[in-house]
Amino acid sequence: MKSSFVIQVFLLLSAIIISIFTVYYYFYKDKNLNISKKPEQLIESKNNNGLINTNKSKTKKDSNILENVEYENYDNEGNRYKITAEKGEIKDANTNVIYMKNVIATIYLKNLEFLTITSLEAIFDNENFKTNFSKNIELKYLNHHLSGENLNFLFEQNLITMENQVVYKNLDTKLMADRIVIDLITKNSKIFMENDNNKIKIFNQN
């Protein structure tokens, strides 16, 4: 009787141990394996997503660099405007603005005359061709020469405005002012000083 009871107890304990081992092996171990794998998968997924997001953000934030940029357009009067630059930079794909370096612009007038503008930098709108020149600006037209710190060309209005340390030279005259406005249609110019108390300086170079 005792021996059969012992055998039954032994078999019962064995069954319990086998059940526990089986449950542990197939359930807890797999669960632990899954738990150990999930962080790696999540990390890898995050890394992949991070790279994608980073690339996308870089695409949005990084500039598009253009080499040897050239644009050309005609106005209603038959004048032609051509602008070239060694390098152009589009900082925002949703705008028409191009940031240019080492710029040469030429305005060909319908009477076959032309003027050139050179500068180290310019901000150019390729939709309306408005251009803001800056740094070491020089404008040359026949025997006329202008230099200054800022020059705005309004293509649709056929107007040029130059300001900040404006110096005008021709064969026999040198003039210093704060601002000059040139109408390309009438060829008329207006010269200003920002302070009414200051006078336009004119020098005879003969």
Image (spheres, rainbow, N blue to C red):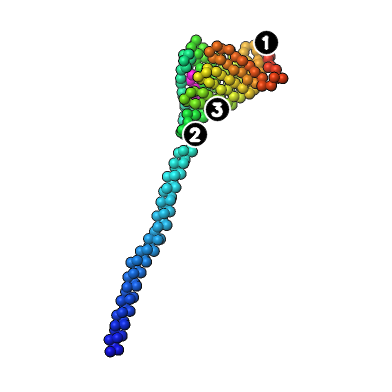
- Amino acid on which the number 1 mark rests in the picture: Asn
Left or right of residue 175: residue 116: left
Q: Name the outermost residue toward the right.
A: 197
Q: Is residue 172 magenta?
A: no
Question: Which quadrant would the C terminus be assigned to in this image?
Answer: top right
Q: Are marks 3 and 2 in contact (CB under 8 Å)?
A: no
- On residue 121, the disc is 3
Q: Which residues are magenta?
A: 81-85
Q: Position of residue 31 (x, y in %)?
A: 37, 63
Foreground disc of the pair 1, 3:
3
Secondary structure category for the residue under label 3: strand
Distance from disc 1 to disc 3, alpha carbons, whole Å, reads 34 Å
Dividing the picture into quadrants, the one containing residue 202 is: top right
Secondary structure beneath label 2: loop
Residue ID for mark 2:
91
- Number of numbered discs overlaid on the protein picture: 3
Question: Which secondary structure class fits the magenta region best?
Answer: strand
Density class for disc 3 (Cα within 10 Å; few <14, some 14-19, many ≥20) is many
